[in-house]
Amino acid sequence: MPQQRRTDRAAIVAASIAVLDERGLDKLSLHAVAARLGVRQPALYHHFKDKGAILSAVAAEVLERGHTDRLPEPGEDWQAFLTRNAHSLRRAMLAVRDGARLLAVAGPRAPELGNAIAQVSFLEQHGFTGADAVLAFVAVSRYTIGATLEQQTASDGGEIRFPDTPEAAHLIEVAAEVARLGPEHEFAVGLAALVSGLSPLRGR
């Protein structure tokens, strides 16, 4: 149903997110966004130069709404912060349809400057060099986006499948247990291993 005629940037972004949730990223068209706002498509170009600019603004808004744990807390250790930050990013992507694909395609290449300064400084205070601090955040964010992307795009739900043969019986049971534990547990296990593996970077 068309909304009241509004074509400011915030309204366009909100309408785009609504269309994204309804249709998915592949069918998010500017025509559909304009129709939802009750305006003609050219009206969108008064605020955004093209669809790519709108998608970038949508990705930023998805992060603004859902990625709430971006900064370290007083007394927090670096492993806990990286873990909490990754779960926060994951929640933001899962909150919208095709959220991981959206961020992979149109998300910011670097965090907001103030956040970046605080994040890198925090890891430096815990023994990382500046370069290794940045690489640690890159590794965690890429794992988080990739794991969430697989979850949101897997046609079979991401289940591990083996041929139903006697020699595969044990692996079938194990795969069923992994499926029972669920994608959140699977993500957390991988994240814990990754964060633990970053320890040798400290004081290198």
Image: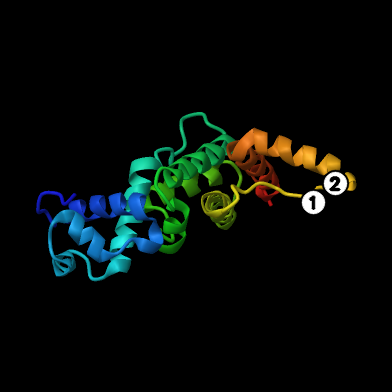
Label 2 environment density (alpha carbons within 10 Å; few <14, some 14–19, many ≥20): few
Amino acid under label 2? Ala
Looking at marks 2 and 1 on the same chain, the residue that comes earlier in the sequence is marked by: 1
| Callout 2 touching callout 1 (CB < 8 Å) | yes
Residue 46 to residue 100: above or below: below
Counting from the top left corner in percent of width and height, residue 14 is at 25, 50
Answer yes or no: is residue 130 visible: no
Q: Which mark is residue 77?
A: none
Say which residue appears at 85% left-offset and 46% top-offset.
168
For label 1, the residue is: 163
Counting from the top left corner in percent of width and height, residue 78 is at 57, 38
Counting from the top left corner in percent of width and height, residue 33 is at 23, 59
Q: Which residue ends up furthest to the top in the rendered image?
A: 75
Q: CA distance from mark 2 to mark 1?
A: 7 Å
Say which residue appears at 85% left-offset and 40% top-offset.
170
Which image quarter: residue 52? bottom left
**Left or right of residue 76, residue 93 in this image:** left
Q: Nearer the viewer, residue 204 or 43?
A: 43
For label 2, the residue is: 168
Determine the secondary structure under disc 2: helix
Residue 98 to residue 85: above or below: below
